Image (spheres, coloured by chain):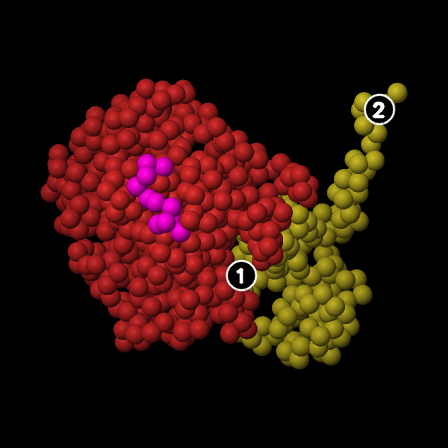
Amino acid sequence: MQKSLHLDPAKCTGCLQCEMACSYEKLGEFNPSRSVIKVFTFHEEGRFAPYTCTQCDEAWCLRACPVDAITMDLTSGAKIVIDDKCVGCKVCTISCPFGTVNYVQETGKVAKCDLCGGDPECAKACPTDAITWIDANATGYDRMKAFAEKSLPSANTSA
Amino acid sequence: MSWTRKILRVNLTEGTCTPEPLNMEWAKQYLGQRGLATKYLVEETDPNVDALSPENLFIMATGPLTGTMASTGGRYSVITKSPLTGAIACSNSGGFIGNEFKNAGLDMIIFEGKSPSPVYLYIENDKAELKPADDLWGKSAWEADEMIHAKHQDPNIKIAVVGRPAEEGCLYSAVINDLHRAAGRSGVGTVMASKNLKAVAVRGTLGVGGVDQPQEFFEAVNAGKKVLADNAVTGEGLPAYGTQVLMNVINGVGGLPARNMRDVGFEGAENISAEAMNEPRASDGKPNLTTNGACFGCTIACGRISTVDKTHFSVKDKPQYHGASGGLEYEAAWSLGADTGVDDLDALTYVNFICNEDGLDPISFGCTVAAAMELYEEGQISNDETGGIDLRFGSAEALVACVEAVVSGTDFGKTLGMGSKLLCEKYGKPELSMTVKGQEFPAYDPRGIQGIGLAYATSNRGACHLRGYTIASEILGIPVKTEQADSDGKPELVKAFQDATAVVDSAGLCVFTTFAWGMEDIAPQIDAACEGDWSIDKCLEAGERIWNMERQYNNAAGFTADDDTLPKRLLKEAIKSGPTEGQVSKLGEMLPVYYEVRGWTPQGVPTAETLSRLGLS
């Protein structure tokens, strides 16, 4: 079964545990500035939203890379940057419609979510289930369920 | 190690920024943040300096767990001598800036001297420089925050900043970070402004590494998170209701003071409670509470994000306050509300916004307004002096006018900026000031709840609930229930809470974890992160060492056992009604026992034996 990261902004509190987990997995240090999952705060709306790569099947970044430095992990479906091949040309950062692949000054290469080899640390670190790792075919089911609940006849009107 | 082992020393007089190594001998004795920065303050300044003189130090400090995945590990503190109390000050804040300091490679920043003109400190990793702030001077904290972000074109900079009242000498000015988090108490913002330092802006991308024993660390951290999630207070109560979960509880047990602590029990408590914040309002069908929010790394997320009703008189013509921002916490809801007799939730939320926007401690501000209301009702303050504000208990209009007077610096605003103690002295009624060592009370009545009275009287920073939160035990039964009316056993309880809290405040963690965590949960996290032995016993010994060091500072600054007291009202005037009717504080019974439990003389001075046991001199 293929799985996907499921992001639910309504549950996010903006604590950044995901960003710390992500950076620790990749760098062995807590460095939110280097995390490839990002939590955005919309102060005046009182909203928080985690966002990261959705791992497109037909991935713009993969198609755009002139040196084949982005490949697909066949087990997790993740599009992975091969650091040894990446030349830091940034074409993928232009091609990605979502902005989830970015250049890193410190390394001279790009970085994006690779789903941690199929066991994403951000989902494990999230205290509120705003980030979960679930069946890729079912990422809409919780919202579907919420609407389904609204369609239930109320108890006192049943025959 | 989870210390970065680096300090930045900023000489504001000379305009220099110089890195230096952290004193690791001290770190192993005093841990970090509150304890370690106080050690620097004690070693480098005379306790008798004028708090607002260039000779006072102003220190921003993180703990070893700040910037790590330990839950709530994002705290930082401001340590200095307080201009409000003349005692040691340590004000702790969450938000995101603590982590940013750590990611810029800094455990601590020590500010010395006074800049000849307004400046702000800009730090980007290893680069630190003082920049002119003439254009920021005279701006609110929110305006200055926006201007600094715009100057550097970097939305990721984290900023700590003072507002206009601090510049004008208001004695309970806070240092605001991340717009609505505050190093709030004891006037630490006033000290910052006295040095012509408007703001500290920091961007850190270096990473926090070097956890001493990573496997043990993650085991301890994950176990700790599970304890927080499974606990009814930290897992359910605080995320849903915030600290405001306490409003109806404390009122119900006869522990909620009202109207400058003249009364206990507030008839309007329900209207300003967490439950009220969740009620949809008539005008737009939305509740006051928009959502809860977390500080850096916090898996509790007690923070309130609120809006004011757009049709409310306080914001009707002010669209800049129609968005969501930091909402009411329990202490602010009490001081701005019950203590002034105001039960208008929107007015309190607006005033809370202004306290954040312009850097005021809402506890001290609310209590000072409450004292002014009593002076006004007694005829000591005239209508002329208030600038026409009809300063009666219960008036939301008066409360709103007062906060606007303080931030715009009117004559009466400056009078309110003196704090309750100097205000009441000015009008010849010092007995009406509800303060200890010059600092205003938080939201628990020492007559109705005995242990907290002793905690207030002996707190090293003046009246404060966060130095020894015995409410946990006396009301909530954490870790064990003690009777709120009893004085027996309270000296031991107060000492235990004070020492443990000193550890939490020095580690980089939030004290709210202790609703669920004991030292058996905390010590393993510190021990795995930091080199050295941080067993439960060693942690508690460090806590006791820190407490005694602070006490020695205060004693050297001229405080004596006579200052470990409460206002006469709380010692003599019995509660008039409700479940705690007839009670007064039994401080006189508890204090001598406390001194003995502490290993202090009957005059409140640590004995030579106590000092030697703790490695103090």
| Secondary structure mostly seen in the magenta stretch | loop
Q: Nearer the viewer, residue B471 or B265?
A: B265
Q: Which residues are magenta?
A: B377-387
Query: Could you tell me if residue B542 is visible in this image?
Result: no
The residue carrying mark 1 is: A32
Query: What label does residue B88 carry, if any?
Result: none
Chain letter for the yellow colouring in the rendering: A
| Left or right, B390 with reference to A108 | left
Could you tell me which quadrant the N terminus of chain B lies in? bottom left
Residue B263 higher or lower than A52, as above or below: above
SS class, disc 1: helix
Seen at 11% across and 43% down, the residue is: B608
SS class, disc 2: helix
Mark 2 and mark 1 lie on one chain; the one further toward the N terminus is: 1
Instruction: Give x and y (percent) for residue B33.
Output: 34, 54
- Label 1 environment density (alpha carbons within 10 Å; few <14, some 14–19, many ≥20): many
The residue carrying mark 2 is: A157
Q: Nearer the viewer, residue B160 or B608?
A: B160
User: Which shade of the palette goes to chain B?
Assistant: red
Seen at 28% across and 56% down, the residue is: B80
Determine if the magenta segment contains residue B137: no
Determine if the magenta segment contains residue B380: yes
